[in-house]
Image: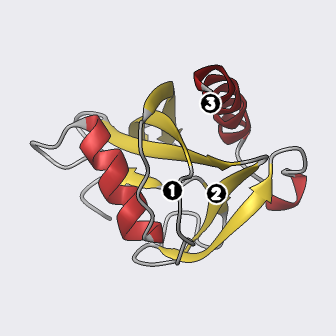
Amino acid sequence: MTDREYPTRPFVGIGIVVIKDDHVLLCRRGKPPNVGSWTLPGGAQDIGETCEAAARRELEEETGLTVGDLHFCAYVDTVRRDEDGRVRFHYTILDFCARWQSGDPVASTDVSETHWAPMDDLEPYSLWSEAHRVIAIARRLIAEAS
């Protein structure tokens, strides 16, 4: 059992949608949970860290990228229960979005691979339905910010 299993409170997770033209940056998870799955870059917010600072830190740690302006995009609640109905994991994920500025992503820390995926063809990546929803919102926000 990890320290986040069977919590007494929700944990805050941070995600970031990085958009480059008509592509979105995806990361393949290299560590549990969901090893091998494609997802958005992100991770846990540290104590004393702002949400925006956490988004920037996680993006740089996992991909080596930095971005300019961040926009709050969406929140996602994920609650996973065990076979007895007890809450095994509980995360509230705050997602931000940004336009790519420069550099090539390089997989690091919790990530085994990065990829610029076409936003109009995300099916091959078997993303969680919430990731599709957040990417769609991010796409609209980035277009409006142009």
Residues tagged 3 and 1 counted as in contact (Cβ below 8 A): no
* Nearer to us in this view, 36 or 98: 98
76 with respect to 69 (left or right): right
- The alpha-carbon separation of the residues under discs 1 and 2 comes to 8 Å
Task: Name the secondary structure under disc 1.
Answer: loop
91 with respect to 16 (left or right): left
In the picture of the structure, the residue carrying the numbered disc 2 is 25
Residue 53 image offset from top left, x and y in percent: 25, 45
Residue type marked 3: Ile
41 with respect to 90 (left or right): right
- The alpha-carbon separation of the residues under discs 3 and 2 comes to 14 Å
- Name the residue furthest left: 48
For residue 111, which numbered disc appears in the image?
none
Q: Mark 3 or mark 1: which comes first in sequence?
A: 1
Q: Residue at x 66, y 26 (%)?
A: 137
In the picture of the structure, the residue carrying the numbered disc 3 is 142
Whether residue 82 is visible: no
- Mark 1, Cα crowd under 10 Å, few <14 / some 14-19 / many 20+, is many
Q: Mark 1 or mark 2: which comes first in sequence?
A: 2
